Amino acid sequence: NLAFQSYVNDVRTGRIPSNAAVTIDPSGKVSVQGVQGVMEINGIISKSIFEANKWRHDFYVEESYVINWMYPYLSPHGLIMKINKEPLPKLTDEMVKNDMDFWAWYFNRLMKDRKFQRDVVARKTFSKLRCAIAGLYVYRRMMNEAEIAFRQAVDLYPSSPEANFRLADMYLQTGRFADALQLMETNLANDPNNDRITGFINQIKDMAQMNNRVSQLQAQLSKGSGTLDMVFELASIYQRTGREQPFQDLAMQVLNNSNIPPQAYLKVADLASNPPRWPLVAEAYQRYLQREKNDPRAWLELACAQAQMGQHDRAIQTLRQAVACGGEPLKDAIRKDTRIDPLRGMEGFQKLVQPTQQPFAPLPGLFGP
């Protein structure tokens, strides 16, 4: 229950993205659906067990689904991985050499074994083991080692969805679109009825086109001949292709430019809202409100961002500004906006959203003699 509540609280506050459906019924009962959400909870439980017992004995893991907190602690250990007592600054040369030597020997031994070639379950199992260690190399940004390990995982079981998709994803991260496309086309030949592969191939082609467009936009903007529309097109592509840091950097360049229309800041806020990056959303609305102080909707949006970041007192102050600009209609909007639910139990919020009482004006002569 503690792990469950911890996960739900982290999702509510935006500390972690919701990888599963989190629903709250009228009675307040919370439920989590989806494998990834369940694994997030398992991750919280496993970390509690690890922290309470790591001084007693060593821990090892055979990965089924990725549990992100483990990555800084992991090192290759034969077929599986060791969870070290403290985070490792890096994988040492000796760790990497031992892993590569062991798997080169074991891979060759397996591939020469006729029984292994006929045993689909064994091929899936060993492919999964190697794929997990390849994922560790990706986390450490050791792409050469990751590619070797992923390739071994694919060769051990060529139809493995995980090995093929994760290797293709690594290629996409490093801009190797042609390699990703070739890999998935080979995978499709091995599994021709898998619609996910076809969809991913189309996605790779789209990403390759977007990458070409990024190069064009960057070249034009670097010459100073671009437009604001081009800036937002580039920001949108960064967002769609998962290039978070370039997106953040470009968004801040826009926000730091006072020579553009204030509506450009609203565009940044809109892009930053999906998925929510509340600090950037808040920054965008703050910049906008420095120039457009009488926009009640912008004050409300800023308050929502502050509420989601846990800045409850500041959000109440911002809502007061919204009501001062927007009056009773804004109060009604505040009452209905679920994004500010974290504020509803606060006395200041309840006073703020109370309907304004109209003074009673008696009809002439009603109380006369």
Image (spheres, rainbow, N blue to C red):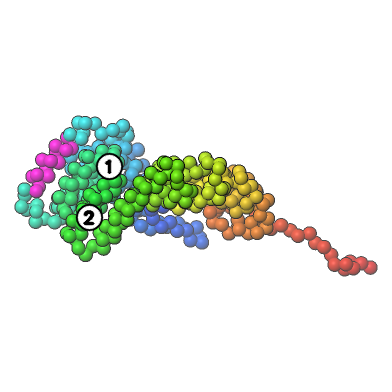
Residue density around tag 2, few if under 14, some if 14–19, many if 20 or more, within 10 Å:
many
Q: Which of 91 and 182 is in front in this view?
A: 182
In the picture of the structure, the residue carrying the numbered disc 1 is: 138
Q: Where is residue 169 in the image (x, y as percent from the top left)?
A: 28, 49
Q: Who's the residue at 16% across and 54% down the image?
A: 158
* Residue lying farthest to the right in this orientation: 369
Side of 271 where 130 appears, left or right? left
Give the mark, 2 or 1, whose residue is nearer the N terminus: 1
Side of 307 where 365 appears, left or right? right
Report the span colored magenta: 98-111
Q: What element carries label 1?
A: helix
Q: Which of 106 and 270 is in front in this view?
A: 270
Q: Who's the residue at 6% across and 53% down the image?
A: 115
What is the magenta segment's predominant secondary structure?
helix
Q: Who's the residue at 41% across and 41% down the image?
A: 222
Q: Position of residue 228 (x, y in %)?
A: 48, 48
Would residue 5 be visible to someone looking at this image?
no
In the picture of the structure, the residue carrying the numbered disc 2 is: 184
